[in-house]
């Protein structure tokens, strides 16, 4: 298999070999592909977890609207109690 790289990527690969981190350009490409595969697997895992969380939300039943004013009132009451006791 032959691949073509942009001049920037070609210099990057050559620089990695010149640094001594890799013995050959082929090693650099193997590592790059391994990291790409790992990233894809992590993305797939995160996507599966997100889909699972969405399904749990759907399965949890009918949604109930939030009463923002009530939440604010309870928060203010809690804050006042903390400030009064502190």
Image: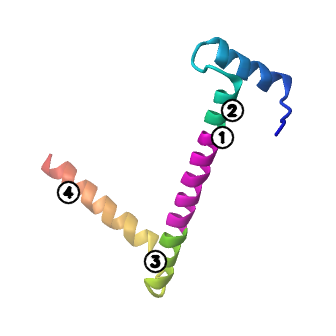
Picture colour scheme: rainbow
- Labels 1 and 4 touching (C-beta < 8 A): no
Please say whether residue 2 is one of the residues in the magenta stretch: no
Q: Closer to the observer: label 1 or label 4?
A: 1
Q: Which residues are magenta?
A: 33-50
Nearer-N-terminus badge (1/4): 1
Q: Which residue is mark 4?
A: 81
State the image coordinates of residue 86 (x, y, percent, origin top left): 15, 45
- Which residue: 65% across, 28% down? 28
State the image coordinates of residue 62 (x, y, percent, origin top left): 48, 87
Between the residue at mark 3 and the residue at mark 2, the CA separation in whole angstroms equals 41 Å
Between the residue at mark 2 and the residue at mark 4, the CA separation in whole angstroms equals 61 Å
Between the residue at mark 1 and the residue at mark 4, the CA separation in whole angstroms equals 57 Å
The residue at the far front in this view is 1
**Residue 33: numbered disc:** 1
Q: Closer to the observer: label 1 or label 3?
A: 1
Nearer-N-terminus badge (1/3): 1
Nearer-N-terminus badge (2/4): 2
Does 9 sit left or right of 27 as displayed? right
- Labels 3 and 2 touching (C-beta < 8 A): no
Q: Closer to the observer: label 3 or label 4?
A: 3
Q: Which residue is mark 3?
A: 56
- Labels 1 and 2 touching (C-beta < 8 A): yes
- Which residue: 38% across, 72% down? 70
Q: Residues within 10 Å of mark 3 (few under 14, many from 20)?
A: few
Q: Quadrant of the N terminus?
A: top right
**Residue 60: numbered disc:** none
Q: Residues within 10 Å of mark 1 (few under 14, many from 20)?
A: few
Q: Residues within 10 Å of mark 2 (few under 14, many from 20)?
A: few
Between the residue at mark 3 and the residue at mark 4, the CA separation in whole angstroms equals 35 Å
Please say whether residue 39 is one of the residues in the magenta stretch: yes
Between the residue at mark 1 and the residue at mark 3, the CA separation in whole angstroms equals 35 Å
């Amino acid at each position: 298999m032959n691949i073509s790289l942009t001049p920037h990527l070609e210099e990057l690969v050559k620089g990695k070999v010149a640094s001594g981190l890799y013995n050959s350009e082929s090693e650099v490409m193997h590592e790059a592909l391994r990291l790409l595969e790992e990233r894809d697997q992590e993305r797939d895992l995160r996507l599966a977890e997100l889909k699972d969380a969405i399904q749990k939300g759907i399965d949890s039943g009918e949604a109930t609207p939030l009463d923002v004013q009530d939440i604010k009132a309870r928060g203010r009451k809690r804050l006042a109690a903390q400030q009064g006791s502190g």
